[in-house]
Amino acid sequence: MDQVTSYWELWWVWCAAALILAILEVLAPGFVFLGFALGALACGILLAALGSGALGLPVLLFLFAALSLASWLLMRRYFALSKGQVKHFEHDIND
């Protein structure tokens, strides 16, 4: 088994990646990295439940992509502005 592949089959690696992506979301807000963080966390939890090495790397990457997309779409649905609604700012920070 390849050394790089074996690391990505460990549950704590996915949880650490989720933490790094969540920190990046704090630094660059806008729900860009949060969907990826939730996808990585879900993969980590799944690997912890099934046991490390239970799923191969291609399956894990597919699950990560699918879960990240699903979480991003759910966040967009619940946290986005309603259709036709526009943000208006009444006050300027310099006023």
Image: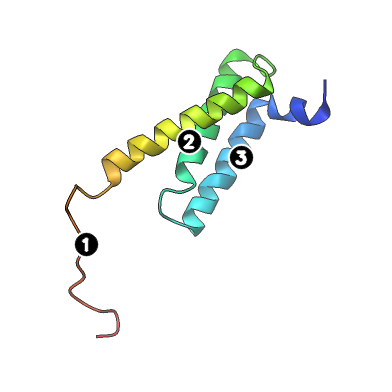
Residues packed near mark 1 inside 10 Å, few (<14), some (14 to 19) or many (20 plus): few
Residues packed near mark 3 inside 10 Å, few (<14), some (14 to 19) or many (20 plus): some
**Above or below — where is 21 with respect to 42?**
below
Residue located beneath label 2 in the image? 38
Residue 17 tag number = 3
Q: Tag 1: residue type?
A: Lys
Q: Tag 2: residue type?
A: Leu
Mark 3 and mark 2 lie on one chain; the one further toward the N terminus is: 3
Marks 1 and 3: which is nearer the front? 1
Rounded to the nearest angstrom, the CA distance separating label 1 from label 3 is 33 Å
| 30 lies left or right of 88 | right
**Above or below — where is 31 with respect to 72?**
below
Toward which corner of the image does residue 57 lie, by quadrant?
Answer: top right
Residue located beneath label 1 in the image? 87
Mark 1 and mark 2 lie on one chain; the one further toward the N terminus is: 2
Mark 2 element type = helix
Q: Tag 3: residue type?
A: Ala
Mark 1 element type = loop
Q: Quadrant of the N terminus?
A: top right
Nearer the observer, 35 or 46 = 35
Marks 1 and 2: which is nearer the front? 1
Nearer the observer, 70 or 51 = 70
Q: Residue furthest front?
A: 84
Q: Quadrant of the C terminus?
A: bottom left
Nearer the observer, 46 or 57 = 57
